[in-house]
Image (tube, helix red, strand yellow):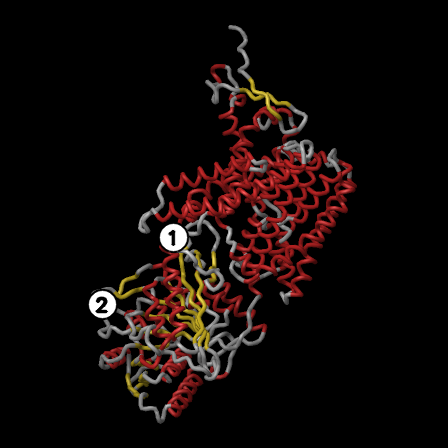
């Protein structure tokens, strides 16, 4: 049998500008080694083997470097360098059978497809409203952070350009931009790890990174386009730029309305089908083709297409379907390909390496210095300025795509490419570990004293955060706020927070409806619910005197939703959080859990709240936002057993009792002669298991505080006919239940303290039957289906802080106590 003929070949440009590489065409897979065929000469088995090496190498590096806080992009680039000509690729046997040049066409095509869809996902997750919010400040930070590194890059480029074959001007632009540009995806990842993504510093960092990356990538794309077309005419470059502008306008005014129309055709109760998803994915491909046709990289079209997709469930669906495969499989190929193209041996001489490292260090320091200076002007704390500067030094995908684009277009040679990739690797290698070590968000604690209603002065503003799970929570919460009697001397500021579960892999989002007004009809159920909630609170604010409202929506996983609530409460310096109970009243009067995860959120918020908090068991409350405050009538009962939580409950009831049409009854339960002093709280372990914070209080001192507060309260209400005070003597839990059940059925709201950690003789025997520890013993009794009176219940927990304070209530007002309290809360979160 004669020697087999070689399959037909296809000639195409190779990885280097002066190469022509032969790519065999024909069979994709081998007929088997038994037919004397080498599997590594056929595309499919070779691709599978290459992917096996890439995945194993990258995962091994991720595992090894995880303790050093290295991002995945760093591990993937290092994997490429290890597999490439800088390390293992130098061995002829390995290079000949694995990553030889003819085999890389298919691999690089798959890698670029992954890059296109990854940039599309970045566009989907991009929130342009953060630019509108931070606007001018973010722009000044961006200019200051780019200017000095750009100048340093220009200065050092004259020394490094001599080691390359590139033109001086071309190398200068690419090197200077590679030092000054910021990677938004890497910044977002670090912010998410440090739990800063929705705090003020996180929002500012995302704004700066977004503007910085837009500037950097725009400069790179425009420069590559100009460099490519210099030989033809300047008008060609101008045509490319104008074509990009026309494409963006087309996407905004034609593509976006078309996608919106497509979304509206799908019923709210149905998920997006494969047809809709396929249409969007085809749109990404078409945008990439158009972008490439007008002379820029296809990622430009994919990014713009992602930006114009309307926010809502469609984005969540797309990210759920794409992100795991793109980020876990395709993007590593792209970074490894970048590493495979990098031959660090091209950077020759100690002086060249020294110059490169010096340029990287000086540019990084300059970016940090510029950011800190602007931060001092805007009164940003010094430590946050340092953190922002470090975050702005991160490098990632977009810059590498631009470098690969320039290399493929022969604008960058191998030596220059290696220099710029090493710049990316080195900056990512040092920034993340330094940032994690020097900036600890747990040390940040916003100082403010009025963390409780009892501590809030009668003639000062009361700030309340109202959390909303569903629109069903809104009427009763608004009526409760309406009954809180806002006055000119004591106005109420209300911050409503709609809590929405994040079901995809996108980042947590905080929507400020005061900046982001809805000018179009809601296109999905979540947006419609948020619009209804915002509208309800706006009407309440307009029709109720001395009330100001601000509305927000947080979209986050239930596992971290408590952080959004606590951050909002602390950022707005609220004294009281109102959050709905996880069960809702049904038509037959029973209570059913609408979502069991709500209970987990409530319990963790109780353990971490930076102020007092009330859980509202909603069984309806009279009143309407359409009525003036003097037309509403409420009959309120406070069950007072003693302790800081009960005193806080009485403080809130005091405000409500000032309402001209409200009636308040305070029932104080006192131990009888036969009451037995318990030795321990049987529910303590149960409460501890749920992570709910408890406090230990000196009983004698606490009893005196109760007596003093009740005495003062009664003196204030001496001439108030709408106020009643009753004392009931009980010996145990059974007597307490009987006394509560004997009350008349004319009341519409019970306010009780949660009594966390308080060991009481009056509730002996009730702890064993408690189903919901977040309500406390009495709150659980009132909220149970067995309780005859179907009345709304507000269960109050007072913020006690750590240190002793007047009234036996510890509120950390000094810096050390603030830091300790935040660290304690963080440990509970962990």
In this view, 595 is above or below 305: below
Q: Helix, strand, or loop for circle 1? A: loop
Distance of mark 1 from mark 2, alpha carbons? 34 Å
Circle 1 or circle 2, nearest the eye: 1
Q: Residues within 10 Å of mark 2 (few under 14, many from 20)?
A: few
In this view, 645 is above or below 285: below
Residue drawn at the location 51% of the way across and 17% of the way down: 37
Q: Residues within 10 Å of mark 1 (few under 14, many from 20)?
A: many
In this view, 512 is above or below 34: below
Say which mark, if any, is on residue 523.
1
Residue drawn at the location 54% of the way across and 38% of the way down: 291
Q: Helix, strand, or loop for circle 2? A: loop
Residue drawn at the location 34% of the way across and 63% of the way down: 471
Of residues 442 and 457, the one drawn nearer to the viewer in this rendering: 457
Q: Residue 736's x, y, as percent? A: 27, 80
Of residues 633 and 672, the one drawn nearer to the viewer in this rendering: 633
Residue drawn at the location 63% of the way across and 41% of the way down: 222
Residue sitting farthest toward the bottom: 719
Location of mark 2 (residue):
589
Residue 734 as seen in the image, left or right of residue 127: left
Q: Residue 147's x, y, as percent? A: 70, 53
Which quarter of the picture shows residue 756? Answer: bottom left
Q: Residue 461's x, y, as percent? A: 47, 78
Of residues 546 and 436, the one drawn nearer to the viewer in this rendering: 546
Residue 259 as seen in the image, left or right of residue 20: left
């Amino acid at each position: 049998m004669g020697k087999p003929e070689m399959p037909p070949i296809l000639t195409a440009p190779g990885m280097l500008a002066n190469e022509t590489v032969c790519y065999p065409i024909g069979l994709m897979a081998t007929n088997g080694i038994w037919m004397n065929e080498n599997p590594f000469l056929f595309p499919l088995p070779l691709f599978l083997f290459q992917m096996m090496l890439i995945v194993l190498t990258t995962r091994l590096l991720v595992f090894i470097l995880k303790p050093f806080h290295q991002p995945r992009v760093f591990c993937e680039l290092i994997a490429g360098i290890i597999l490439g000509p800088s390390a293992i690729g130098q061995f002829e046997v390995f290079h000949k059978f694995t990553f030889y040049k003819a085999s890389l066409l298919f691999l690089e095509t798959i890698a670029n497809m992954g890059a296109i869809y990854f940039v599309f996902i970045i566009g989907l997750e991009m929130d342009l409203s953060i630019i509108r919010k931070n606007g001018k400040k973010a722009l000044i930070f961006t200019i200051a952070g780019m200017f000095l590194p750009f100048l340093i890059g220009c200065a050092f480029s004259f020394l490094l350009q001599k080691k390359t074959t590139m033109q001086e001007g071309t190398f200068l632009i690419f090197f200077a931009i590679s030092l000054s540009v910021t990677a938004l995806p890497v910044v977002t990842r670090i912010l998410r790890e440090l739990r800063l993504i929705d705090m003020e510093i996180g929002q500012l960092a995302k704004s700066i990174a977004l503007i910085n990356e837009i500037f950097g990538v725009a400069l790179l794309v425009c420069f590559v386009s100009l460099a490519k077309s210099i030989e033809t005419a300047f008008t060609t470059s101008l045509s490319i730029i104008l074509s990009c502008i026309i494409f963006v306008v087309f996407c905004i005014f034609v593509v976006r309305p078309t996608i919106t129309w497509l979304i509206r055709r799908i019923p709210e109760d149905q998920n997006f089908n494969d047809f809709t998803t396929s249409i969007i994915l085809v749109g990404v491909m078409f945008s990439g083709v158009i972008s490439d046709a007008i002379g820029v990289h296809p990622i430009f079209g994919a990014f713009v297409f992602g930006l114009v997709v309307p926010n809502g469930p469609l984005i969540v669906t797309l990210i759920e379907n794409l992100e795991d495969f793109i980020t876990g499989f395709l993007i590593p190929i792209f970074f490894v390909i970048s590493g495979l193209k990098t031959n660090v041996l091209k950077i020759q001489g100690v002086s060249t390496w020294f110059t490169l490292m010096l340029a990287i260090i000086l540019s990084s320091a300059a970016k940090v210095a510029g950011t800190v200076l602007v931060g001092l002007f805007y009164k940003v704390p010094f430590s946050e300025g340092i953190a922002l500067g470090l975050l702005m030094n991160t490098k990632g995908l977009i810059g590498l795509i631009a470098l690969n684009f320039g290399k493929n277009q022969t604008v960058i040679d191998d030596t220059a490419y290696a220099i710029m990739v090493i710049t990316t690797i080195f900056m990512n290698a040092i920034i993340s570990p330094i940032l994690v070590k020097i900036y600890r968000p747990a040390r940040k604690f916003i100082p403010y004293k009025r963390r409780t209603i009892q501590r809030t002065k009668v003639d000062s503003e009361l700030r309340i955060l109202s959390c909303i799970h569903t629109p069903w929570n809104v009427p009763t919460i608004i009526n409760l706020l309406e009954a809180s009697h806002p006055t000119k001397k004591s106005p109420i500021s209300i911050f409503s927070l709609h809590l929405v579960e994040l079901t995809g892999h996108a980042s947590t989002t905080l929507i400020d409806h005061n900046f982001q007004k809805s000018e179009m009809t809601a296109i999905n159920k979540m947006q419609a619910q948020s619009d209804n909630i915002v509208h309800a609170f706006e009407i309440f604010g307009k029709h109720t005197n001395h009330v100001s409202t601000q509305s927000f929506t947080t979209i986050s996983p239930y596992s971290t939703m408590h952080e959004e609530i606590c951050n909002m409460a602390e950022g707005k310096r609220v004294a009281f959080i109102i959050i709905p109970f996880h069960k809702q009243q049904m038509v037959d009067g029973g209570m059913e859990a609408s979502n069991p995860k709500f209970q987990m959120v409530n319990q963790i918020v109780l353990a971490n709240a930076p102020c007092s908090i009330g859980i509202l068991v909603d069984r309806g409350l009279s009143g309407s936002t359409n009525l003036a405050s003097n037309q509403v009538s409420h009959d309120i009962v406070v069950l007072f057993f003693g302790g800081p939580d009960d005193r806080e409950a009485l403080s809130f009831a005091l405000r409500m009792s000032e309402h001209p049409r409200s009636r308040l009854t305070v029932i104080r339960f006192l131990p009888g002669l036969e009451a037995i002093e318990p030795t321990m709280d049987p529910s303590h372990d149960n409460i501890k298991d749920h992570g709910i914070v408890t406090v230990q209080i000196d009983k004698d001192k606490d009893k005196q505080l109760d007596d003093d507060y009740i005495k003062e309260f009664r003196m204030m209400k001496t001439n108030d006919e709408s106020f009643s005070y009753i004392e009931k003597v009980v010996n145990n839990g059974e007597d307490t239940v009987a006394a509560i059940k004997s009350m008349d059925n004319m009341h519409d709201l019970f306010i009780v303290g949660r009594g966390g950690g308080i060991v009481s003789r009056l509730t002996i025997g009730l702890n064993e039957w408690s189903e919901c520890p977040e309500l406390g013993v009495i709150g659980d009794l009132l909220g149970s289906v067995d309780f005859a009176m179907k009345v709304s219940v507000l269960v109050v927990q007072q913020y006690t802080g750590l240190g002793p304070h007047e009234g036996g209530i510890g509120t950390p007002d000094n810096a050390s106590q603030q830091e300790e309290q935040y660290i304690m809360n963080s440990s509970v979160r962990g």
